[in-house]
Image: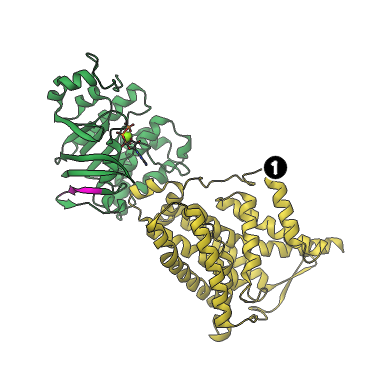
């Protein structure tokens, strides 16, 4: 469904991603793991056309996304929950959700997805008229995910939803993603929390300093020596332990 | 006697306030959505006055049709300015955006005024009135034209408000002002929204210019004072506050005409600036605070 080949990208003269390749098949739940500053966010932004590529190709459903502006990528059915959420904080919860369906012209479909999001996150239903600025961190995370779902995307990119959330909420968010995946959404999830994430994703890529250093099935990765050393803290590795254990 | 003067001053001020509200809302929209400090805004007003003049005198349109004509041409002029001047700049670089666009708009003001002078000549083009007659109200007589101008401003502002609040496109404009990245991510084409916003803003200025034609005739420099007064409003209420700019517009309008009636010609600008300076000393973000983020 989504395939990245030999992607090089960065900010101005600072190259962040080096020959990154990864693939997510239809219906899969794949994780992209790695420490702070590895380039995970940059990878998702490159897919969305928010960061220019210096070389490489990104294919979605067989078609190249290279040089497509962000709104076109969204229109194709890829939706990103960014790390900073990028919510419309001076607008109401309802307006945010309606904007999530901006690309949907059919009013009945908008109504239907609004209902679906309200069912998924009853907290949001109760806060429809409230300004986003008054929401808690957890509610904002749900709103950001809900806003994404409003366009009924076929592929979801989610950037560190656990950031700043209490452990119980992190599990709730991951459970929600799992459920969406079971309902047919293809998911690429960026996380730092290796152990928990690998329980949810079926496959994962590990990105370190802009290179894909490891990839494979979650079960194999959990047993992998490098993961054990560097991320699961079974012994002291060279890379500092950046995993946030739950 | 003194109350009569006061009443006329206030009624003239309220009517000027309607015009300033149209102007200040346009400025605020461009500022909030595009981060452009438009110092050519008064020239868009001036062009509107010309469109009103040609519609009425040359084409013989009835007043309301003349306003619609001015609005349409103003909309198109705004769209063209964005596509020709601002769009290419946006594509090239967003660095130093505020300064670059300020210079572009200042240059544009100069060009518009001189082209108008060249093409339409250096003379006043006004009309005696759109609608004849005056209305008597509490010992004050106000010309029907002034009332119509105020009414048109009110209707246009309410329509714009509804558009921004209820339509998908209006919501998209607010979204771009709120969070550009978020707007792109939900699928909004920023280029279209920018062009539309500039066009709408230019349309509001043109409506103001056209409706005030019998009071302020069209002239290449007609926009200069209006531009300054509209900026006073924006500074007074705090950059980027649409609701506040309506209130601010009436404050400035009334203040200006009180100064004119009670102190004398030549004083309105001085008194306006003094009051604004005093308010900004007490409330540096303006009366209603600022909603424009200081990014870019
Ligand atoms: N807008 C930017 N301009 C310049 N450099 C940037 C920008 N955004 C990120 N970087 C740099 O690019 C590198 C990769 O950043 P990125 O945000 O992709 O990492 P990440 O893996 O998402 O990290 P985290 O887990 O902390 O979110 C970092 O060194 C960062 O400093
Ligand atoms: Mg990140």
Quadrant in which ligand 1 is drawn = top left
According to the picture, the residue beneath numbered tag 1 turns out to be B282
Residue B177 x, y percent position in the rendering: 46, 50
* Residue occupying image coordinates x 87% and y 64%: B1
Check disc 1 and report its element: helix, strand or loop. helix
Say above or below: B12 vs B131. above
Range shown magenta: A54-61
| Chain with colour yellow in the figure | B
| Chain with colour green in the figure | A
Residue A110 x, y percent position in the rendering: 31, 49
Residue A183 x, y percent position in the rendering: 19, 37
Q: Is residue A232 left or right of residue B247?
A: left
Q: Is mark 1 within 8 Å of ligand 1?
A: no
Residue A2 sits in which quadrant?
A: top left
- Residue A83 colored magenta? no
* Residue occupying image coordinates x 41% and y 48%: B180
The one of A105 and A223 positioned closer to us in this rendering: A223
In the displayed image of the protein, which residue is found farthest to the right?
A: B1
Q: Is residue B275 left or right of residue B91?
A: right
- Residue A57 colored magenta? yes
Residue B114 x, y percent position in the rendering: 57, 75
User: Is residue B223 shown to the viewer in this render?
Assistant: yes
**Main SS of residues in magenta:** strand
């Amino acid at each position: 469904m989504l395939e990245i080949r030999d992607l090089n990208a960065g900010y101005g003269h600072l190259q962040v991603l080096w020959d990154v390749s990864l693939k997510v098949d239809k219906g899969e739940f794949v994780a992209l793991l790695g420490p702070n500053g590895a380039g995970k966010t940059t990878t998702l932004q490159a897919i969305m056309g928010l960061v220019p590529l210096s070389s490489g190709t990104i294919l979605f459903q067989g078609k190249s996304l290279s040089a497509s502006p962000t709104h076109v990528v969204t229109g194709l059915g890829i939706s990103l929950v960014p790390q900073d959420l990028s919510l419309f904080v001076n607008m109401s919860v309802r307006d945010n959700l309606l904007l999530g369906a901006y690309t949907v012209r059919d009013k009945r479909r908008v109504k239907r997805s609004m209902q679906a999001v309200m069912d998924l996150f009853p907290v949001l239903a109760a806060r429809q008229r409230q300004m986003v600025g008054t929401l808690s961190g957890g509610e904002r995370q749900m709103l950001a995910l809900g806003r994404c779902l409003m366009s009924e995307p076929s592929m979801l990119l989610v950037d560190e939803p656990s950031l700043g959330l209490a452990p119980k909420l992190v599990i709730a968010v991951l459970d929600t993603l799992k459920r969406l995946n079971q309902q047919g959404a293809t998911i690429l999830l960026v996380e730092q929390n290796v152990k928990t994430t690998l329980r949810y994703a079926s496959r994962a890529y590990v990105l370190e300093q802009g290179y894909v250093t490891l990839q494979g099935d979650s079960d194999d990765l959990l047993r992998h020596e490098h993961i054990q050393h560097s991320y699961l803290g079974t012994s002291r590795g060279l890379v500092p332990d950046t995993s946030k254990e739950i | 006697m003194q109350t009569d003067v006061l009443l006329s001053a206030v009624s003239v001020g309220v009517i000027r306030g309607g015009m300033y509200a149209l102007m200040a809302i346009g400025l605020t929209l461009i500022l909030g959505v595009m981060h452009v400090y438009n110092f050519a805004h008064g020239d868009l007003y001036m062009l509107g006055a010309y469109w009103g003049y040609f519609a009425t005198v040359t084409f013989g349109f009835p007043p309301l049709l003349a306003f619609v004509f001015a609005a349409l041409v103003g909309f198109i002029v705004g769209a063209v300015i964005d596509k020709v001047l601002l769009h290419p700049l946006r594509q090239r670089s967003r660095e130093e955006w505020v300064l670059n666009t300020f210079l572009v708009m200042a240059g544009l003001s100069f060009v518009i005024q001189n082209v108008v002078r060249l093409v339409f000549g250096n003379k006043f083009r006004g009309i005696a009135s759109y609608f004849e007659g005056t209305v008597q109200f509490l010992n004050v007589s106000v010309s029907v034209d002034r009332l119509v101008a105020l009414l048109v401003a009110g209707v246009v502002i309410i329509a714009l408000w509804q558009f921004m609040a209820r339509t998908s496109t209006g919501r998209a404009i607010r979204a771009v002002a709120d969070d550009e990245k978020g707007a792109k991510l939900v699928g909004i084409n920023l280029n279209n929204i920018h062009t539309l916003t500039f066009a709408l803003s230019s349309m509001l200025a043109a409506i103001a210019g056209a409706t005030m034609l019998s009071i302020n005739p069209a002239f290449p420099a007609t926009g200069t004072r209006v531009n300054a007064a509209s900026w006073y409003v924006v500074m007074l209420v705090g950059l980027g506050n649409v609701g506040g700019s309506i209130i601010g517009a009436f404050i400035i309008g009334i203040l200006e005409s009180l100064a004119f009636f009670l102190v004398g010609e030549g004083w309105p600008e001085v008194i306006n600036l003094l009051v604004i300076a005093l308010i900004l000393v007490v409330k540096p973000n303006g009366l209603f605070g600022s909603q424009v983020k200081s990014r870019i």
